[in-house]
Image: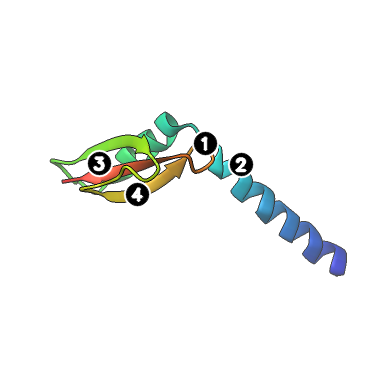
Amino acid sequence: MKKFILAVGLLSIAGTALAGGKSCEDLKSEIAAKLDAKHVSGYSLEIVDKGAAAGGKIVGKCEAGSKVIVYRK
């Protein structure tokens, strides 16, 4: 049982590490698809360096957290 819990813990850590390195364009496309599926219109998604997200809401992090995706309506 301890080995199973350890394996699950390690896999969850590995999964978050892989998600942090996701391409910004891929993540931006995924977010846009979700917004379009909810019939949201009149928005923009912009990829900016971390810390330069003035005037919008951060909706995603990519490239190991060095960039963010900003939503503006």
Disc 4 versus disc 3: distance between alpha carbons? 15 Å
- Looking at the image, is mark 4 or mark 1 earlier in the sequence? 1
Q: Which residue: 28% across, 35% down?
A: 46
Q: Do labels 3 and 2 touch, CB within 8 Å?
A: no
Q: Do labels 4 and 1 touch, CB within 8 Å?
A: no
Q: Position of residue 49 (x, y in %)?
A: 38, 37
- Looking at the image, is mark 4 or mark 3 earlier in the sequence? 3
- Looking at the image, is mark 2 or mark 4 earlier in the sequence? 2
Q: Which residue: 73% across, 59% down?
A: 8
Q: Do labels 1 and 2 touch, CB within 8 Å?
A: yes
Disc 3 versus disc 1: distance between alpha carbons? 21 Å
Circle 2 residue: 18
Disc 2 versus disc 4: distance between alpha carbons? 18 Å
Decide: few, some or many residues near mark 3? Use Cα within 10 Å; few <14, some 14-19, many ≥20: few
Circle 1 residue: 22
Q: Which residue: 32% across, 42% down?
A: 52
Q: Where is residue 13 in the image (x, y as percent from the top left)?
A: 67, 53
Q: Position of residue 45 (x, y in %)?
A: 27, 38
Looking at the rendering, in which quadrant would you find the N terminus? bottom right
Circle 4 residue: 59
Disc 2 element? helix
- Looking at the image, is mark 3 or mark 2 earlier in the sequence? 2
Circle 3 residue: 36
- Looking at the image, is mark 3 or mark 1 earlier in the sequence? 1
> Mark 1 belongs to which amino acid?
Lys
Disc 3 versus disc 2: distance between alpha carbons? 26 Å
Decide: few, some or many residues near mark 2? Use Cα within 10 Å; few <14, some 14-19, many ≥20: few
> Mark 3 belongs to which amino acid?
Asp
Q: Which residue: 26% across, 45% down?
A: 71
Q: Position of residue 65 (x, y in %)?
A: 49, 43
